[in-house]
C-alpha cells in the first residue's frame, strides 16, 4: 500500500493482469457489462463564468429522482458533482455560510492567486 492510500471499507479487489485503462474487455469480464444509459430530463439550466472557470448548473430528473449536476469546465477539462434534490436545502445553507465567512474574514494574502 502506498503511504497516502487508505484501506477501503469495501475490501480490496485483487489485481488482475491486463485490466488497465482502456481495456474494455477486461472491465466487462471483471465487473460486468457497462451500465445502460439512463434517460435524464433537463428541468432547468444556468451558467456562470468566474475568472477562467465556467460553471454549469443543471437540474435534472431520471427514474431515481431529481438532482443538481454542477459541472466545472476549465480549458476543456470537465469535472462534475451531483447533489440529490433531497440535499439541496442543506447544500444551500452551507453555501450561504461560506459566502458570509468569505465576506467577514479578512484576506491574509493581499495578492491572491487568480489561478486558484
Image (tube, grey):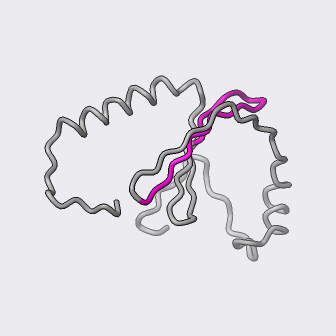
Quarter holding residue 109:
bottom left
Residue furthest bottom as drawn? 18
- Residue at 82 percent across and 54 percent down: it is 34
Does residue 67 lie above or below 52 as drawn?
A: above
Q: Seen in the image, is 81 located left or right of residue 95?
A: right
Residue 11 lies within the magenta run: no
Does residue 22 lie above or below 80 as drawn?
A: below
Numbered circles on residues, count:
0
Q: Position of residue 67 (x, y in %)?
A: 63, 32
Look at the image and give the residue range highlighted in magenta. 52-69
Q: Seen in the image, is 100 located left or right of residue 81?
A: left
Q: Position of residue 84 (x, y in %)?
A: 60, 31
Q: Using the image as rendered, state which of residue 80 and residue 36 is in the foreground.
A: 80
Q: Seen in the image, is 60 located left or right of residue 50?
A: right
Does residue 70 lie above or below 53 as drawn?
A: above
User: Does the magenta stretch mainly form a helix, a strand or a loop?
Assistant: strand
- Residue at 68 percent across and 30 percent down: it is 43
Does residue 40 lie above or below 14 as drawn?
A: above
Residue 54 lies within the magenta run: yes
Q: Position of residue 37 (x, y in %)?
A: 82, 46
Q: Seen in the image, is 48 located left or right of residue 100?
A: right
Q: Position of residue 65 (x, y in %)?
A: 70, 27
- Residue at 62 percent across and 57 percent down: it is 12
Amino acid at each position: 500500500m502506498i503511504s497516502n492510500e487508505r484501506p477501503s471499507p469495501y475490501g480490496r479487489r485483487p489485481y488482475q493482469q491486463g485490466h488497465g485503462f482502456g481495456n474494455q474487455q477486461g472491465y466487462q469480464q471483471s465487473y460486468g457489462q457497462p451500465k445502460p444509459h439512463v434517460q435524464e430530463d433537463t428541468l432547468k439550466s444556468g451558467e456562470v463564468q468566474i475568472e477562467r472557470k465556467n460553471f454549469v448548473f443543471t437540474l435534472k430528473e431520471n427514474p431515481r429522482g431529481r438532482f443538481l449536476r454542477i459541472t466545472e469546465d476549465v480549458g476543456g477539462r470537465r469535472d462534475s458533482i451531483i447533489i440529490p434534490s433531497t440535499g439541496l436545502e442543506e447544500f444551500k445553507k452551507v453555501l450561504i455560510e461560506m459566502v458570509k465567512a468569505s465576506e467577514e474574514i479578512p484576506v491574509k494574502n493581499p495578492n491572491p492567486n487568480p489561478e486558484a
